[in-house]
Image (cartoon, rainbow, N blue to C red):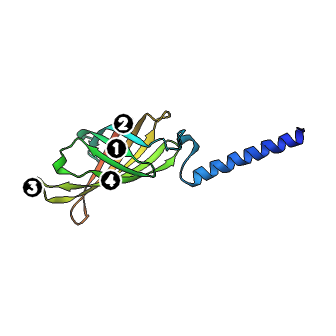
Amino acid sequence: MTQGTSLKTVALMATAAAATTLLIQACGGSAEAQTADGANAIEGVWESNVTIKDCTSGAVQRTFRGETVFHRGGTLTADNSLPVPSRSTSLGVWTQDAPGGYTAKFRFLRFNADGSLAGAQKVARTIVLSANATTMTSTITGQLLDLAEAPLAQICGTETAVRIY
C-alpha cells in the first residue's frame, strides 16, 4: 500500500467516524452516554433519597425514598414511599441535554383522605449522572396543582440516587 492510499484510507475512516458521531448527536444521543448494547446510560432502575425543601428558606419539609425506571426511548415511571392512597404512580418523560446531563419531567394525581381527586403535581428533575453511570444527583422543582390545574404551591428539593438494575 502506498503512502497516498494509506492517507486516503485514514481520511475516509475519520470522515465516517465523524459522520457517525454527528448522526448519534442529531438523534438526541451522545457517544459518551451509549452503552455497549446501544442503550442510553440513564436507562434502568434507580433508587433515590429525596429531600423536599421550602423554596424560600431552604428548610427541609420532608424526606422519602423513591424509585424511577428510565425506559428506553425517553419515558419514565416513578413511585415513592409516601402513602399510596394519597397519590398515583408518576408517569413522564426524560431527555438527554448533554453528556451526563438529563431532564426528567413527570406528573401524578393527588387524592384526598376520602379517596376523591384533589389535583395533580408536576415535577421536573435536572439530573447529573456520574461518569460510571452508577449514581446521580438531581435538583427538583415542581408545582402542586388544584383540580382546575391552577398552581397551589411551588416545590423544591434535591435527590441522590443509585442504580439498582
Q: Between disc 3 and disc 2, whose residue precedes? A: 3
Rendering coords of residue 112 (x, y %): 13, 55
Q: Nearer the viewer, residue 151 or 21?
A: 21
Q: Mark 3 touching mark 1, by CB under 8 A?
A: no
Q: Is residue 111 above or below residue 46?
A: below
Give the distance between the C-alpha atoms of the residues marked 4 and 1, in whole angstroms. Answer: 10 Å
The residue that disc 1 covers is 68
Residue, x 19% and y 47% (percent of image)?
84
The image quadrant where one finds the C terminus is: top left
Q: Are marks 3 and 2 in contact (CB under 8 Å)?
A: no
Is the residue under label 4 in contact with that under label 2 (CB below 8 Å)? no
Mark 3 or mark 1: which comes first in sequence?
A: 1
Q: Which mark is residue 81?
A: none
Callout 1 amino acid: Thr
Residue under the point 59% across and 50% down: 24
Name the side, left or right, on which 40 lies relative to 13.
left
Real-space CA distance between mark 2 and mark 4, rounded to the nearest whole angstrom: 18 Å
Which mark's residue is nearer the viewer, 1 or 2?
Answer: 1
Q: Residues within 10 Å of mark 4 (few under 14, many from 20)?
A: some
* Secondary-structure class at tag 2: strand
Alpha-carbon neighbours of circle 2 within 10 Å: few (<14), some, or many (≥20)? many
Farthest-out residue, bottom: 148
Q: CA distance from mark 3 to mark 1?
A: 28 Å
Tell me the residue at 39%/50% (across/down). Answer: 104
- Cα separation, mark 3 vs mark 2, equals 33 Å
Rendering coords of residue 115 (x, y %)? 12, 56
> Where does label 3 land, which residue?
114
Q: Which residue is mark 4?
A: 91
Asked if labels 2 and 1 touch by Cβ distance under 8 angstroms, the answer is yes
Instruction: Quickly name the residue at label 2.
Output: 161
